[in-house]
Amino acid sequence: MSSTEAEITAAELAVREALWLNNLFAYMRNLPRDKMIIKIDNINAMHSLENPVINNATKHIEIDFFWMQRYIQEGQLVLLKVDTNDNIADGFTKALQKLKHESFLKLLKMI
C-alpha cells in the first residue's frame, strides 16, 4: 500500500466518523450541519481527494474512497494540510527521537 493510499484510507475513515458525529449533533441541536475540517499531512492524498484523476499514485485506490468529493465540492468538507511538525497523530503511529517526542508531548499539553 502506498503512503498516498494509506492517507486516503485514513482520511476516509475520519470523514465517516466526522460525518456521523456532525449529523448526530445537528439532529440533537436542531441546527444545520457544521463544516467538517480534516487535516492531512500527505499533499498527494489531499490533491487526489480534491481532484480525482487516476495516476500512478492513485491507480490502486478503490473508487469507493472518492465519495468524499461531493462533500468537498459542496463546501461541507475542507481538507487542510498539516505540517509534519504539527501532526499530533505521528506521535501515536511512529517511533520518535527525543526532541520530536518532547514536541509531541507539548502538542498534547502534557509538559
Image: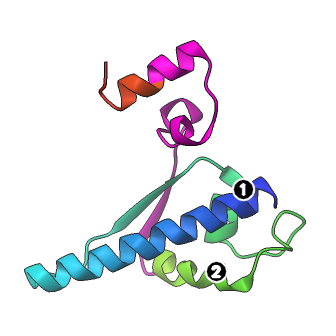
Question: Which amino acid lies under the numbered mark 1 shown in the image of this protein?
Answer: Asn
35 relative position to 47: left or right: left
Residue 76 appears in the figure: no
Tell me where the magenta segment starts and ends, as one range. 74-103
Which residue occupies 56% across, 64% down? 11
Give residue 77's mark.
Answer: none
Residue 31 horizontal/vertical position (percent):
13, 81
Residue closer to the observer: 39 or 109 = 109
Separation of marks 2 and 1 at Cα, in angstroms: 14 Å
What secondary structure is found at the residue carrying circle 2?
Answer: helix
Residue 75 horizontal/vertical position (percent):
41, 74
Give residue 44's mark.
Answer: 1
83 above or below 37? Answer: above
Which picture quadrant has residue 8?
bottom right
Within 10 angstroms of label 1, few (less than 14), some, or many (20 or more) residues? Answer: some
Question: Which amino acid lies under the numbered mark 2 shown in the image of this protein?
Answer: Phe
Which picture quadrant has residue 25?
bottom left
Give residue 66's mark.
Answer: 2
Picture quarter with the C terminus: top left
